[in-house]
Amino acid sequence: MKRTKRPYVVCHMVPSIDGRIVTRHWKLPPKVLGEYERTARTYDADAWMIGRVSMEPYAGKARVPKRKTARPIPREDFIAPHDADSYAIALDPSGKLTWKASDIDGEHVITVLTEQVSDDYLAFLQAKGISYVFGGKAEVDLEKVLRKLRESFGIRKLLLEGGGGINGSFLAADLIDELSLLLAPIADGSTGTPSLFDAKPGKGPTRHLKLVSFEKRAGDLLWLRYQRRR
Ligand SMILES: NC(=O)c1ccc[n+]([C@@H]2O[C@H](COP(=O)([O-])OP(=O)(O)OC[C@H]3O[C@@H](n4cnc5c(N)ncnc54)[C@H](OP(=O)(O)O)[C@@H]3O)[C@@H](O)[C@H]2O)c1
């Protein structure tokens, strides 16, 4: 049987000089955000994906109701009706995100779950019109998820946009094809805060990269592009 291809993955991030990524206290001028969006657009990607923690502010807060009937819901992927051709994807293994809507600025929401999520949560997602795919029973197989995203939604290019937890998991699984960094003119100096890649303990790989281009952008950002050297 022919294996489905997976999308091409570009990890697009704004790290400090020392690789930290929590931008809250950096007081970056708005033009930095503009540069982030402008450079992201040059990739012409079909989707962006972020970790559960980074998605929280975008997902909002809704109530997950308890169902009246106890009929179990099969652990099968669900494609909600939508007419979007671009996607906002969350990696949320235990179903913690309380989505308010099924789109983010017109981009259809897809959430990646494990089979351990509750039936109430699946009913909530279906009622909200949010698509979901299962990544595994208790752990997420990221490569399998990427293949499903290509097969079921036609996603060919995906921007992986942090934070450190999800980036580290993709790096460990060797699923990052390109790295696009807007290096901020900030020495952060913190320890114990999320960094560009936070793989799980013992899973921190070393990956070699090839520098493709570098460019000075507005706000003293340095846009560095690398490809995975295979
Ligand atoms: N500077 C930038 O460009 C940039 C970009 C994005 C985000 N950020 C910042 O990054 C910070 C958040 O980073 P973070 O590392 O704490 O969180 P994160 O990567 O956004 O989310 C981590 C969560 O995603 C889920 N996850 C990640 N890898 C997984 C895997 N292999 N299998 C199953 N689930 C997985 C887990 O959810 P569960 O805990 O539910 O299991 C994990 O706790 C925020 O402060 C945000 O503002 C910065």
Image (cartoon, rainbow, N blue to C red):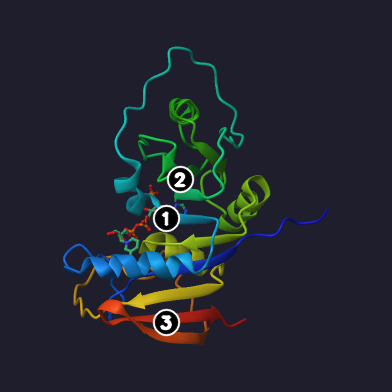
The 10 Å Cα crowd at callout 3, few under 14, some 14 to 19, many 20 or more, is: some
Image quarter (top left, top right, bottom left or bottom right) of the C terminus: bottom right
Query: Which comes sooner in the sequence, label 1 or label 3?
Result: 1
Measuring from the top left, give residue 225's x and y in whole percent: 47, 80
Q: Circle 2 — which element? A: loop
Distance from mark 2 CB to nearest ligand 1 atom below 8 Å: yes
Tell me, yes or no, if residue 115 can be seen here: no
- What's the CA distance linking mark 1 and mark 2? 12 Å
Query: Which comes sooner in the sequence, label 1 or label 2?
Result: 1
Q: What residue does disc 2 label?
A: 93
Distance from mark 1 CB to nearest ligand 1 atom below 8 Å: yes
Quadrant location of ligand 1?
A: bottom left
- What's the CA distance linking mark 1 and mark 3? 20 Å
Q: What residue does disc 1 label?
A: 50
Q: Quadrant of residue 215?
A: bottom left
Q: What residue does disc 3 label?
A: 224
* Residue located at (60% from left, 37% from top): 77
Q: Circle 3 — which element? A: strand
The kind of residue on which mark 3 rests is Leu
